[in-house]
Amino acid sequence: MTGSTSTLLSRRGLLGAFAATAVAAAPSYANAFSFLRSRSADARRLQMYSERTGESIDTIYWVQGEYIPEALQEITYFMRDWRDDAVKAIDPRAVDFLAAVHNLVEVDEPYMLLSGFRSQRTNRLLASRSGNVAQNSLHLTGEAADIRLQSRSVNQIARAAQACNVGGVGRYSRSNFVHLDCGNVRSWGS
């Protein structure tokens, strides 16, 4: 799960970049810089639960500049396609994005994970039910997650994610969830 030195250096700076961008782009998150800086200096944490599987995860996945392979494996398994138990490695950039947004919205509540990795079969099934499912979804490559927080609105979560300026942010207000991915910077939905 480790990458080249240049990849690790860019990953190490990711949360710092999130925080700096958040301060410039979203004054309502002005205290995020110091909060993320102190949290990301030593450790990064991800908290989620799934009503579909009944499972939860609360793990430190990065400590003092290094990803913890066992924690990333635990996250990968947790974010599997629950319909058929298919597993695909979750991109650490997606995990970092999830953690940064969670820090910016300043809650202790874990995310509810609606969808992490999706198999081709699941993606086809969902696409047959909705026109909002991309044929080449980043869920297929372990680079996306659909999440919700009970204590924050779709707009609050999406604004925090957009402040990071690092990936895709989809607002699905009618279904009450936010899509986050580590693809190109873009946003959609209402």
Image (cartoon, helix red, strand yellow):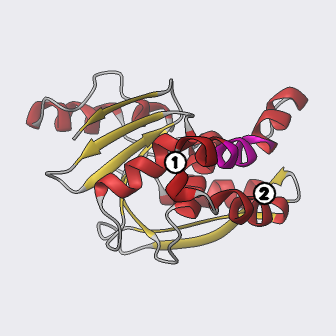
Q: Is residue 16 magenta?
A: yes
Is 47 on the left or on the right of 62, as rendered?
A: left
* In the image, residue 147 above or below residue 60: above
Kindly state the secondary structure of the residue where label 2 is placed. Answer: loop
Residue 108 lies, in percent from the top left, at: 52, 78
Three-letter code, disc 2: Ile
- Of 24 and 170, nearer the camera is 24
- The first of marks 1 and 2 along the sequence is 1
- Of 70 and 173, nearer the camera is 173
Disc count in the image?
2
Q: Residues within 10 Å of mark 2 (few under 14, many from 20)?
A: some
- Of 167 and 121, nearer the camera is 167
- Residue 140, picture quadrant: top left
Three-letter code, disc 1: Ala
Residue receiving disc 2: 68
Residue for point 36% across, 75% down: 54
Q: Looking at this rendering, what residue extends furthest in the front direction? A: 27
Residue 112 lies, in percent from the top left, at: 37, 66
Residue for point 21% across, 41% down: 190
Residue 33 lies, in percent from the top left, at: 70, 56
Q: Is residue 1 visible to us here?
A: no
Residue for point 86% across, 27% down: 6
Magenta residues? 13-20
